[in-house]
Image: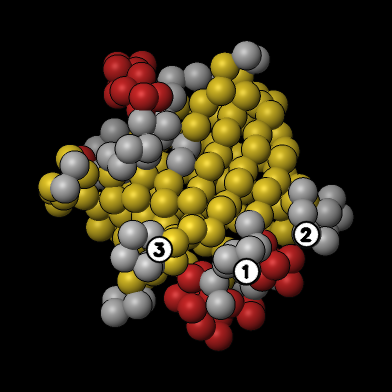
C-alpha cells in the first residue's frame, strides 16, 4: 500500500480513479509522465540570488516562461532505516537548460502526515497534508517547515516560510493530469508557481 493511500485512508477512494492509479506508488510501481507547463512564474527579482542557490540544490530556479516542456518521475525507494520513500524528480526544459524541483517523501505514521524533504542535498523540510476536493482532485498543502543544515534542522518562523499548495486533477476530456503549484511567503507573496498538464507514460 502506498504512503499516500495510508495517510489518506478512506478519502483516497474519493479521488478520481486515475489519480488513485497515479498515487498508487510503491515498490515496483514507479510513475513517469511528460507534458507542458503552460506557465512558470517566479518571485521578485531581488530574490534571484536565492533562486540561483536553489539551482545548486535542484530546488528553485530563476527562469520563467510559457509552454515549458516538463517531465516527472516518482520512484519508490527504501531508506537506510527501512523506511518507504518516494523520490520526486520534476524536470523543466528551458531550451538546453534543465531545471529541477526535487523532493523525497515518506510517511510519519504517528502524526499521519507526509514528510517532505526538499532539494538534493536536502535544504528544507515540510509537513504535508493531503485532501480531496469536490472535483475529486488532490490538494497537497505544506505546513510546518524547517531549514536543513546537514543533520541540523532549524524550525522556520512563519515569516520565513515558503508554503506550497499543490492541486492535481485528472481531465478526462484530454486524458491528462492537470497540475497547479504555488509557493507563497506570508510577507512577500508568491515566490514560485507553475501550472500545466502531463500524461502518464506507464499507466492507463
The disc, 1 or 3, on the residue closer to the chain's N-terminal end is 1
Q: Check disc 3 and report the residue beneath it.
A: 106
Q: Position of residue 74 (x, y in %)?
A: 57, 52
Observer-nearest of 129 and 5? 5
The disc, 1 or 2, on the residue closer to the chain's N-terminal end is 1
| Disc sitting over residue 117 in the figure | none
Q: Vertical placement of 93 versus 196: above or below?
A: above
Mark 3: which secondary structure?
strand
Q: Check disc 1 and report the residue beneath it.
A: 24
- Say left or right for 116 vs 34: left
Labels in figure, total: 3
Report if the CB atoms under discs 1 and 2 are less than 8 Å apart: no
The image quadrant of residue 160 is top left
Q: Check disc 2 and report the residue beneath it.
A: 203
Observer-nearest of 189 and 139? 139
C-alpha distance separating marks 1 and 2: 11 Å
Q: Position of residue 60 (x, y in %)?
A: 41, 30
Amino acid at each position: 500500500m502506498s504512503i499516500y493511500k495510508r495517510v489518506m485512508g478512506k478519502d483516497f477512494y474519493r479521488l478520481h480513479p486515475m489519480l488513485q492509479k497515479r498515487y498508487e506508488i510503491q515498490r515496483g510501481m514507479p510513475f513517469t509522465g511528460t507534458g507542458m507547463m503552460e506557465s512558470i512564474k517566479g518571485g521578485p527579482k531581488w530574490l534571484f540570488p536565492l533562486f540561483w542557490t536553489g539551482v545548486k540544490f535542484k530546488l528553485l530556479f530563476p527562469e520563467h516562461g510559457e509552454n515549458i516542456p516538463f517531465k516527472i518521475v516518482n520512484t519508490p525507494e527504501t531508506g537506510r532505516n527501512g523506511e518507504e520513500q518516494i523520490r520526486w524528480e520534476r524536470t523543466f526544459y528551458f531550451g538546453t537548460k534543465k531545471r529541477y524541483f526535487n523532493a523525497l517523501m515518506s510517511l510519519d505514521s504517528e502524526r499521519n502526515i507526509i514528510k517532505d524533504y526538499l532539494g538534493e542535498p536536502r535544504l528544507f523540510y515540510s509537513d504535508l497534508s493531503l485532501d480531496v476536493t469536490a472535483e475529486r482532485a488532490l490538494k497537497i498543502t505544506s505546513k510546518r517547515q524547517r531549514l536543513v543544515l546537514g543533520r541540523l534542522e532549524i524550525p522556520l518562523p512563519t515569516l520565513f516560510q515558503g508554503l506550497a499548495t499543490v492541486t492535481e486533477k485528472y481531465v478526462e476530456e484530454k486524458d491528462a493530469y492537470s497540475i497547479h503549484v504555488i509557493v507563497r511567503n506570508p510577507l512577500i507573496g508568491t515566490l514560485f508557481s507553475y501550472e500545466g498538464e502531463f500524461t502518464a507514460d506507464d499507466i492507463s
